């Protein structure tokens, strides 16, 4: 079986072509079957490939001069979809020249370009940005949306739950991933109307390949008891950044504490293997690679400041999603469930919500 | 000068009368001038006071049999405002028998009872729950709202900014605290319409005793560069819990890492002073005591699982707010600014937002 190529936007990100190409080379060692399409300044890419003959043998270069700037408005970037490295990497997925695109560039532009070029899959109203976060358990937790949609309807949230669960089946191996909605309390009455409606729809839905377990609060996301955390893009972005910032805060305090006395400094040297373990576990490069779910094609966002190892992880995420055919899986799940039935459920659960006595009838009518 | 009393709901919280009374006794040692009104089961309070003769001498007991349950709905608790320890503690503030109330009970019930009994101060539409969080800087950062209002208008956010700044002047000593709105990016175009309107109103307002510095992302709240983080109650609650959960996650990982080998265990023993410093810095008891701002009276929420030292911190917060007369300060700030002018600004900035060309005129008209 010949697996499709991965298009790498070699120009995006703070660190330049060298890091993107080195990252692709690292990823290729783990996923030898993959071919690459390296998009960007041909000379610079050629130069970077000098150190990676293995990748060179597996790569084609697509030259272009134009690059999307980091602070560029998505609407502005959209106009240069046919001339920029980001736009051409996505275009390669659209025309079937690649199965996935990876970019470390401007997130808003990547989202806008991907949406316009690849379009959302049937049954999905809006794509969502999903990422993996470390937990105390055996598997990472998937959280979505992380900022693609500032405001979300109950129907959006239900669709995110289905997409997140399809991704979680690949990551965790669980047939029925445990899905929860992010809320400010676990009681049924907490949160916005949209959250309550989404919860009711997910509780009522029986054809889903997931276990909906209600609400989760932001302090228990990382305990290992949930596989998919579903939220609107505003709250998800706040939660993700709060978690990142707090982890950095604690490790910074720890560094200060270790420097506070000679005894502590000695203790630090002795316990270095332990703190290295912690550092490795928390290094965002080891969880790099956020995925836009719900598009007709795989698009992965690498963090702008990722190292080559980080880029390699983002490329590996795209390779894994291609190997496991995530897009097809989500489509199958949606078909299994029947999009129209789902829409009806979200609509009727809203009615149910305001008139609990109708619930059994409404369910029977479906 | 005789300072008013602090009413302590001795029955709220997971730990019972003993912890509440011990906490009050600890706080009293730091704030000797204060008197106390201990509300709850008279027998149990008397028993707990046996170990605290100093507090006994400074206290009056207000006996009642009824207690608000932890899982009780606020609407239900409201009906028993005149018979429960929580209700009577707040009532003491209302009738002037105490200057502040402290409770470790049901947050929703405390909010509802406080709002009904004390009412919001003139110029404030909704009270907000504010708490202190540790930073890498010299001072704690104040964040509000933390869950009292799930959805907030631009006007609510502007009022929260003013209240938070008044609180921050007491905590940080800065005449013009640095205030930012929590958002998913720092660019002007990020976030919801309400956030953009609130930012525009705060930027345009000149009579405020604060420096509005735009948006802040959740990963930089704790860096020490902002004094007040303003947000709606949903996002604030998510951010607060994400920060707490992530800090616990990292310290749990650290514990595991230290246990992972004999060498690490030895290193841990030697560097214990450093890790103890960290533990102390992160212990939520040292930042216990969230305040309902915007009421005609001071109400402080102690965490349900706080230790006696934690309760003492919550009581000390209420003592400090009384000494510094926070309620009066907020009122003065609001008067200084003129509530109607502020309302007009929020309204006009909404117009400005949709039609940028009108901006100079609209500002000149004010």
Image (spheres, coloured by chain):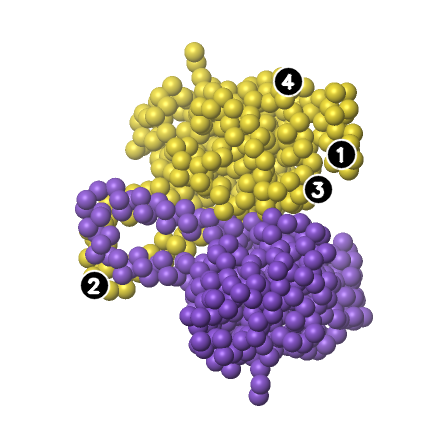
Chain colours: A yellow, B purple
Q: Earlier in the sequence, mark 3 or mark 4?
A: 3
Task: State which tag comes first along the sequence, 4 or 2.
Answer: 2
* Distance CA(mark 2)–CA(mark 1): 66 Å
User: Which chain is mark 2 on?
Assistant: A
Q: Is residue A61 above or below residue B272?
A: above
Mark 3 and mark 1 in contact? Answer it, CB < 8 Å: no
* Mark 4 surroundings within 10 Å by alpha-carbon count, few (fewer than 14), some (14 through 19), many (20 or more): few
Distance (Cα) linking label 3 and label 1: 15 Å
Q: Residues within 10 Å of mark 1 (few under 14, many from 20)?
A: few
Q: What label does residue A335 carry, if any?
A: 4
Cα distance in 3D space between marks 3 and 4: 27 Å
Kindly report the distance in space between the C-alpha atoms of the residues bearing marks 4 and 1. Answer: 29 Å
Q: Is residue A31 above or below residue A246?
A: above
**Label for residue A262?**
2
A335 lies left or right of A256: right
Say if labels 4 and 2 share a chain.
yes
Residue sitting at the far bottom: B1
* Residue corresponding to mark 1: A356
Q: Chain of mark 4?
A: A
Identify the residue position indicated by label 3 in the image. A193
Q: Nearer the viewer, mark 2 or mark 1?
A: 1
């Amino acid at each position: 079986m010949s697996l499709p190529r991965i298009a790498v936007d070699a120009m995006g990100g703070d660190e330049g072509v060298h890091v993107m190409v080195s990252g692709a080379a690292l990823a290729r060692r783990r996923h030898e079957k993959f071919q690459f399409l390296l998009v960007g300044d041909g000379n610079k890419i050629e130069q970077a490939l000098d150190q990676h003959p293995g990748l060179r043998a597996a790569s084609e270069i697509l030259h272009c001069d134009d690059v999307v700037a980091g602070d560029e408005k998505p609407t502005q970037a959209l106009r240069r979809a046919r001339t920029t490295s980001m736009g051409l990497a996505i275009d390669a997925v659209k025309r079937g020249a690649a199965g996935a695109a990876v970019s470390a560039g401007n997130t808003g532009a990547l989202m806008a370009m991907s949406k316009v070029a690849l379009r959302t899959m049937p049954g999905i109203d809006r794509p969502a940005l999903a990422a993996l976060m470390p937990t105390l358990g055996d598997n990472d937790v998937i959280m979505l949306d992380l900022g693609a949609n500032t405001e979300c309807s109950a129907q959006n949230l239900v669709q995110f739950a289905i997409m997140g669960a399809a991704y979680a089946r690949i990551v965790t191996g669980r047939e029925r991933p445990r899905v929860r909605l992010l809320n400010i309390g676990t009681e049924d009455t907490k949160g916005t109307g949209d959250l309550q409606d989404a919860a009711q729809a997910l509780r009522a839905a029986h054809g889903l390949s997931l276990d909906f377990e209600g609400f989760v609060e932001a302090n228990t996301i990382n305990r290992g008891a949930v596989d998919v955390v579903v939220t609107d893009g505003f709250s998800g972005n706040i939660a993700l950044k709060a978690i990142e910032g707090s982890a950095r805060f604690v490790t910074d305090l720890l560094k200060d504490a270790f420097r506070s006395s000679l005894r502590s400094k000695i203790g630090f040297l002795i316990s270095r293997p332990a703190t290295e373990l912690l550092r490795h576990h928390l290094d965002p490069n080891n969880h790099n690679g956020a995925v836009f779910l719900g598009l007709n094609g795989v698009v992965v966002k690498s963090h702008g400041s990722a190292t080559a190892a980080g880029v390699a992880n983002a490329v590996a995420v795209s390779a894994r999603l291609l190997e496991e055919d995530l897009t097809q899986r989500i489509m199958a799940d949606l078909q299994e469930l029947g999009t129209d039935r789902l829409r009806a459920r979200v609509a009727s659960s809203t009615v149910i919500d305001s008139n609990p006595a109708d619930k059994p009838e409404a369910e029977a009518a479906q």
